[in-house]
Image (cartoon, rainbow, N blue to C red):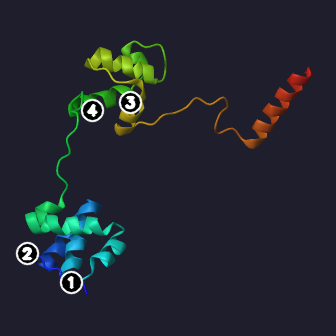
Amino acid sequence: MSKKKILHRDVDVESLKELRGKMDDPKVRDRITAVIMEVKGYKRGEMADLLSVHRETVRLWIKRFDESGVEGLWDEERPGRPSKISGSEKERLREDLKGSPKDFGYESEVWSTKMVLDHLREEYGVEYHPRYIQRFLRSLGFELKKPRPKHHKASEEEKKEYYQRVEEAKKGRP
């Protein structure tokens, strides 16, 4: 027989439901749902199954709510290295990269990882590792475009004709 779970603070289920409806963060929504389910008498195992988390996770959410109220359901700020460039500099960089590299004295028509690294060093005075720069650029809303040996919009017929010409050239025929 399981021990009845009792929250040590008064809970207004309706206000929790209203708050849950306004939440953008799915983690916080799940935590609020767990508190509501706790008040309604669900077993922790049932709650865990319905929320697709471990029972211990549900227990910790309830404990956080018990100790800190609704504020305890939000994640605390996680420590980490501060960004090397500010938010306004990131915006300026985004605008730089939307333009042509030629505007900054490069000979190429398109940006390469090497050019972006060089641009960051020259214009912003920061250094990044080449492997990190692609992830950094994705965070700014850019994506890697790989050069293609043939046009990606070429029709199937044109592709067949091209490969046929290549095969004929390999055989030494005109």
Circle 4 is placed at which residue position?
91
Q: Which residue is under mark 2?
A: 8
| Callout 4: SS | helix
Q: Which of the two discs, 1 and 3, labels the residue nearer the N terminus? A: 1
Q: Quadrant of residue 151?
A: top right
Residue for point 20% across, 83% down: 3
Given the image, on which type of amino acid does mark 1 rest?
Lys
Furthest residue in direction front, as rendered: 1
CA neighbours of label 4 inside 10 A, class few (<14), some (14 to 19), many (20+)? few
* Element marked by disc 3: helix
Residue at figure coordinates x 35%, y 18% from the top left: 119
Amino acid type at mark 3: Tyr
Residue 167 position (above or below residue 23):
above
SS at mark 1 in the image? loop
On the question of residue 76 being in view, the answer is yes
Q: CA distance from mark 2 to mark 4?
A: 47 Å
Q: CA distance from mark 3 to mark 4?
A: 18 Å
Q: Are marks 3 and 2 in contact (CB under 8 Å)?
A: no
The mark nearer the N terminus, 1 or 2, is 2
Q: Which residue in the protein does label 1 denote? A: 40
Which one is in front in this view, the residue at disc 1 or the one at disc 3?
A: 1
Q: Position of residue 158 (x, y in %)?
A: 76, 37
To which residue does mark 3 refer? 132
Residue 15 in the image: x percent, y percent? 13, 75
Image position of 29 (left or right of 65): right
- Residue 49 on image: x %, y %: 36, 73
Q: Which mark is first along the chain, 2 or 3?
A: 2
Mark 1 → mark 2, Cα distance in angstroms: 15 Å
For discs 1 and 2, the disc positioned in front in the rendered view: 2
